[in-house]
Each structure stands twice: as C-alpha cells, then as structure tokens.
Image (tube, rainbow, N blue to C red):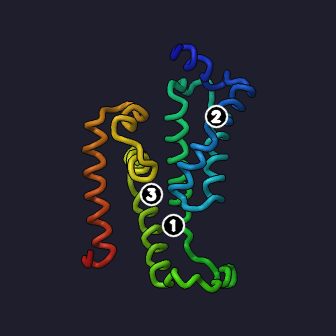
Amino acid sequence: MKAQAAMALEPGTLPATELERVFRDHYAAVFRAAYRITGNSTDAEDALQTVFLRMLKRGPAADPVDNMASFLHRSAVNAALDLVRARQTNRNVPLDDLKPVLAEAAQHRPDRLQAASEIREWLRGALARLSPRIAQMFVLRFFEGKENPEIARLLNTTPGTVAVTLSRTRDRLEREFRSYLGGVA
C-alpha cells in the first residue's frame, strides 16, 4: 500500500483531483503549523499557499512523497520560517501604518501584554535561526504537544535522537533568552 501511495504522489504525475484531496485532507494542519511559527493568520495563509504551490510545481525529477502528512508539515515549517526570516530583514514600519491602540481590558496590564509580545517575537526569531529540522522538532513538541515517538515517526528518526535534539535546543534557547534579557533570567 505504501509503495502505491508513493507512486501515486510522484511529482509531475499528481492529478488535480489527487492534489485537491491532499489539500482537503491536510490544509488545516499545514495552516496550524505555519500559524504557530508566524503568529498571524495572514502569514500562515501565505505559507499554506506557498506549500501547495510548491507541491504543484514539483518537477518529475523530485523524490516521491512517502509520508504526506510529514512532508506537508515540514514544508509548512520551512515556508513559515522563510516568512519570519524575511520579516526580520525589514522591520521598519512607518508610524502612520500602525493601528491606534484601543483601551485594554482592566485585567490586561499593558506592560505584561508588551512583554509577552516581545517574548513571542524573540522566540519567532530564535526559531528562524535554528535549522529547519530542529525547528520542526521544537514546534512539534512544544507548540503542538506531540510526544517524542510520534515526532520520530513523522521525521523518520529515533525517539532518542528527538529527545537529545530537543534537550540541547531547549538549553540553547534558554541561554540565548537569558542573554537577550541581559543575564537577568
């Protein structure tokens, strides 16, 4: 069955109806993966579109896809990381383009909202600096809550490799965050 699925999904031979089925089956997961990295729906939709356009444009020399869910998730992470990296190179926003800040609810202190926003931006940047495979492991574990054996299966590796990679990555990000805070944390 797996060989048949891989053959049916060979690049260049994917019929439009099959691509449509793949889209219907996986678009939500692709969107969620991209959203968790980009932090906004517009960028996540751009990443979603990029993933499926790239899939449509795959040439006949490309490798067949054995695990469509894993392939699409990896593609979504890569597309989202590309968007985040591109946004970091152009951070200047004219003040006229910013929406006015509306009054916040009493339970939302502005300093806490700002700090949380800054931490999210820092984390997006830190994920963009990681290799795509390591970033994907991190997102699967800490954003999507997947367990190490499931991550290993999705990424075609061992649970031990996933555990070691995640531990080292978490330690690295923690050191970088302390440095970001000026050694206070």
| Among numbered discs 1 and 3, the one appearing first in the sequence | 1
Query: From mark 1 to mark 3, how far is it between C-alphas?
Result: 9 Å
- Residue 72, image x, y percentages: 55, 38
Residue 128 - label? 3
* Element class at badge 2: helix
In front: 8, or 163?
Answer: 163
Mark yes or no: residue 75 visible: yes
Query: From mark 2 to mark 3, how far is it between C-alphas?
Result: 27 Å
Mark yes or no: residue 57 visible: no
- Residue 77, image x, y percentages: 50, 47
The residue drawn where x is 51% and y is 17% is 2
* Element class at badge 1: helix
Mark toward the viewer: 2 or 1: 2
**10 Å crowding of disc 1: few (<14), some (14-19), many (20+):** few
Seen in the image, is 13 located left or right of residue 92? right
In the depicted structure, whether residue 67 falls above or below residue 3: below
Marks 2 and 1: CB-CB under 8 Å? no
Query: From mark 2 to mark 1, how far is it between C-alphas?
Result: 32 Å
**10 Å crowding of disc 3: few (<14), some (14-19), many (20+):** many
Seen in the image, is 31 located left or right of residue 109? right
Marks 1 and 3: CB-CB under 8 Å? yes
The amino acid on which the numbered mark 3 sits, given as a three-letter code, is: Ala
Task: Give the labeled residue for mark 2.
Answer: 25
In the depicted structure, whether residue 107 falls above or below residue 40: below
Task: Give the labeled residue for mark 1.
Answer: 88
| Among numbered discs 2 and 3, the one appearing first in the sequence | 2
Seen in the image, is 164 located left or right of residue 155? left
